[in-house]
Amino acid sequence: MIMNIIAQLQGGLGNQLFQYATARALAHQHKTSLLLDQSWFTKTYEDVTPRESLISALSTKGAPISLDLPPKRPKRIHRILQKLWPINPFVYSERTPYCFDPSLLKAPSFKTQNLYLMGYWQSYRYFESIKKILQLEVSPKAPLDAHYQNYLNQIQACNSSMVHVRRGDYVHLASAAKVHGFIGLDYHQQGMAILLDRKPETHFFVFSDDLDWVKANLPYQDKMTFIQSLDKGDAVIQELELMTHCQNHLIANSSLSWWAAWLAKDSNNTVICPSRWTNDLTMNWDDLLPSHWQRI
């Protein structure tokens, strides 16, 4: 039996969830304990949006730890040596972003090694086997704030569709704009038209980090409720919960709305997603975007 699975958490809530879910699936498979290394959040980084560790506000498993000296990305010689000797921990670093790596399921080499995961692990194939577990665990520990409960009542009382418009750092931070970039107004207009065509009674619940822009630009505003964010640390967790209750999902190229669609309470939800997730035109997105999601 492997000693422990240790996940390095980093990034925003959506990224933390990919890291958690992949490690959780491995811990479940190996029937071993799960540790969540949060040391990344104690430092500041250039060209990176500042984030907080939010996993502990969810009903997730795993013990939080903060390593004084977290492992570094292993060089080639280290990767070879840890397969030949029981070096602890066995550091497994993600090879290709957004691509499922089946050899992760075969690590580590020795049963006496902890397995330390370093990467983003953005593929549902790592954790699809525990989807029902994740639907239970990725939910707020605390009851919804009355402000959000009011929105939830509205979402549950109609044919609801989430619309997520991610601008923020995708517009204003050069490094994020270069990789992801704002998906564009045309995408949102087209997606909303498809959803209305299927169900004319659809009511849109709009989640965005730039509501002023949304109110000035999105069509169908007579069929729209704007979700006003509370200025609280766990607001994003409560908003993710609201998103999962929507019957259909028009997601942004954002890991947060990816999770909203994948964890949806209604398994028959229609999901409309961007046909490409980043500005890399050479990428194949089949490991990230399930085949039944409609790409536009």
Image (cartoon, rainbow, N blue to C red):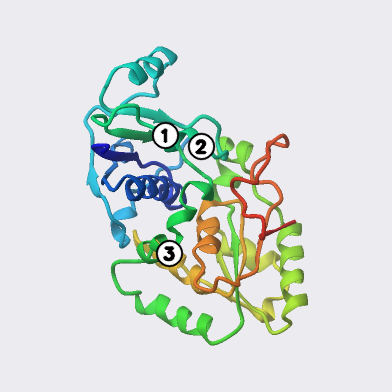
Q: Position of residue 149 (x, y in %)?
A: 40, 79
What is the three-letter code of the residue carrying label 3? Lys
- Report the quarter where the N terminus lies: top left
Other residues around mark 3 within 10 Å, as few (<14) / some (14–19) / many (≥20)? few
- Of residues 163 and 261, the one drawn nearer to the viewer in this rendering: 261
Residue drawn at x 49%, y 54% as measured from the top left: 128
Disc 3 to disc 1, how far (Cα)? 23 Å
Q: Quadrant of residue 172?
A: top right
Residue drawn at x 27%, y 33% as measured from the top left: 114
Which residue in the protein does label 2 denote? 102
Which residue in the protein does label 3 denote? 132
Residue drawn at x 61%, y 82% as measured from the top left: 159
The answer to whether any part of residue 152 appears in the image is: yes
Disc 3 to disc 2, how far (Cα)? 21 Å
Q: Is residue 226 left or right of residue 291?
A: left
Q: Are marks 1 and 2 in contact (CB under 8 Å)?
A: yes
Q: Quadrant of residue 234?
A: bottom left
Which comes sooner in the sequence, label 3 or label 1? 1
What is the three-letter code of the residue carrying label 2? Pro
Which comes sooner in the sequence, label 3 or label 2? 2
Q: Position of residue 226 (x, y in %)?
A: 56, 73
Which residue in the protein does label 1 denote? 106
Q: Secondary structure at mark 2?
A: helix
